[in-house]
């Protein structure tokens, strides 16, 4: 591990650079808190960008429809006036609360933060896709075997097989339908754990000859020279060989809190229990918002995370400035905020 000589001091450290974490950074700036963001992934956007960057989102207030990628771009534009440092590719592995009640936070790359409060916006924690259990798959990962779809354009006029039966598999099957040269969905049974509307749309596409559906499991890959040429499907009647240039395996994710599980937090079902008055965890000064937060009637929605972050940061302010009373100012009347936004627009 590369050591760092001096800790980075900030009022709030946000762990997670997904939509909720990015918006939290904006809210921190609005109420006058200094802030840094750290994320184990090598780009901003969190699970939205990793899993469904081009999937439409319809429940963001005042935005009738946008893709996850567009949402993240808008959020990054929104925080630009504050010029907030974002530390990517760095997984936080330890947190310690000192005698002065501030926190020392360290990443696996040796970066150290000194902060008054911690806001955990880490989605479902660390997550990895369930991988294909066939020996040929590992060598093809990132080239012709995929566990997410980064860009639909990469599959243009290709022979594509999508494997899986959940929402993600059905969503991407429908998205690829008008892109791929030939498209086949493979699932181990004729039933699906996906939205009924998506299943109906897939079946209509099959009936219209726009794609194929095969019941079975992937038995092996045909890639003798390191280039995927086909997939062998095992089913009740034997095996079937399908031509394929790209294979997208969407069997779901294995979620893991990772180091967060060692931070002495009150956790239930892999999520952090919080007080809904301020989304503070069982450890004062450490907050959890977004999908990783748990409370009764919790709704896993991006807009819920925005609300949670707003309230959490107002409590965090009292840790950063215990002797200072924060005065609420509506953004419409916030002259300093207006000046920052205008300046960022001028230099864009």
Image (cartoon, rainbow, N blue to C red):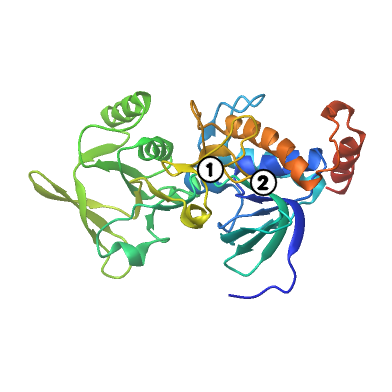
Seen in the picture, residue 278 relative to 12 is either above or below; the reply is: above
- Residue 55 visible somewhere in the drawing: yes
Seen in the picture, residue 291 relative to 35 is either above or below; the reply is: above
Q: Secondary structure at mark 1?
A: helix
Seen in the picture, residue 97 relative to 59 is either above or below; the reply is: below
- Quarter of the image where one finds residue 9: bottom right
Q: Which residue sits at x=64%, y=27%?
A: 63
Q: Is residue 239 left or right of residue 315?
A: left
Q: Is residue 107 left or right of residue 262?
A: right
Percent x, y for residue 118? 66, 49
In primary-sequence order, the first of circles 1 and 2 is: 1
Percent x, y for residue 204? 31, 26
Mark 2, Cα crowd under 10 Å, few <14 / some 14-19 / many 20+, is many
Q: Residue furthest front?
A: 99
Seen in the picture, residue 223 relative to 200 is either above or below; the reply is: below
Percent x, y for residue 152? 48, 45
Mark number, residue 48: 1
- Residues under labels 1 and 2: Cα distance? 27 Å
Q: Quadrant of the N terminus?
A: bottom right
Residue denoted by label 2: 285
Q: Secondary structure at mark 2?
A: loop
């Amino acid at each position: 591990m590369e050591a760092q000589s001096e800790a980075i001091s900030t009022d709030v450290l946000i762990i997670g650079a997904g939509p909720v974490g990015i918006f939290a950074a904006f809210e921190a700036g609005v109420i006058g808190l200094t802030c840094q963001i750290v994320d184990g992934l090598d780009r901003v956007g969190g699970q939205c960008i990793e899993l469904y960057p081009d999937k439409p989102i319809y429940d963001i207030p005042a935005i009738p429809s946008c893709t996850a990628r567009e949402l993240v771009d808008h959020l990054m534009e929104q925080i630009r006036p504050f010029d907030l440092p974002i530390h990517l590719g760095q997984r936080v592995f330890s947190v310690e609360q000192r005698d002065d009640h501030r926190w020392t936070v360290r990443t696996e790359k040796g970066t150290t933060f000194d902060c008054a409060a911690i806001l955990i916006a880490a989605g479902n924690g660390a997550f990895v896709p369930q991988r294909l259990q066939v020996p040929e798959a590992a060598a093809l990962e990132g080239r012709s075997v995929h566990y997410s779809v980064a860009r639909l354009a990469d599959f243009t006029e290709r022979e594509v097989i999508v494997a899986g039966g959940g929402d993600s598999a059905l969503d991407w099957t429908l998205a690829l339908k008008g892109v791929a040269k030939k498209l086949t969905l493979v699932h181990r049974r004729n039933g699906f754990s996906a939205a009924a509307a998506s299943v109906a749309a897939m079946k209509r596409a099959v009936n219209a000859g726009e794609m194929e559906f095969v019941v079975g499991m992937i038995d092996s890959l045909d890639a003798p020279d390191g280039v995927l040429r086909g997939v062998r499907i095992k089913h009740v009647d034997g095996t079937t060989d399908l031509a394929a240039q790209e294979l997208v395996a969407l069997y779901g994710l294995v979620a893991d809190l990772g180091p967060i599980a060692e931070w002495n937090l009150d956790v239930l079902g892999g999520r952090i229990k919080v007080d809904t008055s301020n989304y503070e965890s069982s450890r004062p000064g450490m907050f959890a918002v977004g999908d990783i937060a748990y409370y009764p009637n919790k709704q896993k929605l991006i807009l819920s995370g925005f609300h949670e972050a707003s309230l959490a940061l107002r409590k965090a302010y009292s840790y950063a400035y215990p002797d200072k009373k924060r005065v609420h100012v509506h953004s419409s009347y916030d002259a300093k905020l207006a000046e920052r936004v205008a300046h960022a627009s001028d230099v864009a």
